[in-house]
Amino acid sequence: MLGGRSTRYHVYKRPFVDFFLRTVSGWYTLVIFTASMPEYADPVIDWLDAGRGILARRLFRDSCTQLPNGSYTKDLALVEADLARVCLIDNSPVSYKVNEANGIPIEGWTHDPYDEALLDLLPVLDSLRFTSDVRRVLGLRGAGAPGR
């Protein structure tokens, strides 16, 4: 049910998402922070988690701040007070505008079966495990960095 009405929608998994989640969940506590409504997002998150318990927490639109232009930002302090250990992977830079130094951009996905964006993020996420403050590392990225 979405908006009180029965709604059918199709969701496709980005290539390598299962491998990505399995790998990264061994390194980090994974939190889904989405601007979607729980009625839509919960079934998708359940499908991605597949009963593995690797997606520790869920934050939805009601945890976001809506800007005058209608877009949503995500305050990462809701995830963890110590932002030195938090990063947000998002295809919308507006989403991490409040905590820009914690953002990791990723291109949106539109059914490209050859997409490897999630695989490309693995070396970055792996290296961030060994820093005391992810913002110092993420702040070094330049115009030629992955995801830019």
Image (spheres, rainbow, N blue to C red):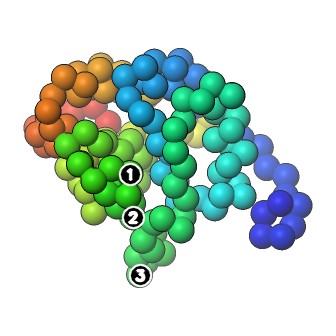
Number of numbered labels in the structure image: 3
Q: Mark 2 points at which residue?
A: 73
Of the residues shown, which amino acid type is indicated by label 1? Answer: Val
**Residue 128 appears at what percent x and percent y?**
23, 28
- Spatial CA span between label 2 and label 3: 11 Å
For label 1, the SS is loop
Looking at the rendered structure, which numbered label has been put on residue 79?
1
Residue visible at 28% across and 31% down in the picture = 146
Against 21, is 63 above or below?
below
Q: Which of marks 1 and 2 is in front?
A: 1
Reading the chain from its start, which is encountered first: label 2 or label 3?
A: 3
Instruction: Give coordinates of residue 120: x percent, y percent.
Output: 37, 23
When the figure is inspected, residue 63 is found, relative to residue 12, above or below; the finding is: below
Task: Give the quadrant of residue 76.
Answer: bottom left
Residue 58, given in percent of the width and then of the height, sits at: 54, 49
Q: Do the residues labelled 2 and 3 touch (CB within 8 Å)?
A: no
Q: Which residue is drawn at 27% across and 53% down?
A: 81
Question: In the rendered view of the protein, which quadrant contains the C terminus?
Answer: top left
Q: What element carries label 2?
A: strand
Identified at 40% across, 76% down, the residue is: 67
Q: What residue type is labelled 2?
A: Thr
Q: Mark 3 points at which residue?
A: 68
- What residue lies at 21% left-to-right and 33% top-to-bottom? 145
Q: Quadrant of the N terminus?
A: bottom right
Q: Which of the two discs, 2 and 3, sits closer to the camera?
A: 2
Q: Which residue lies furthest to the bottom in this view?
A: 68
Q: Would residue 93 be visible to someone looking at this image? A: no
SS class, disc 3: loop
Q: Which amino acid type corresponds to the residue marked 3 in the rendered image? A: Pro
Q: Few, some or many C-alpha atoms within 10 Å of disc 3 (few <14, some 14-19, many ≥20)?
A: few
Q: Can residue 28 be seen in this view?
A: yes
How far apart are the two marked residues, 1 and 2, measured between alpha carbons? 13 Å
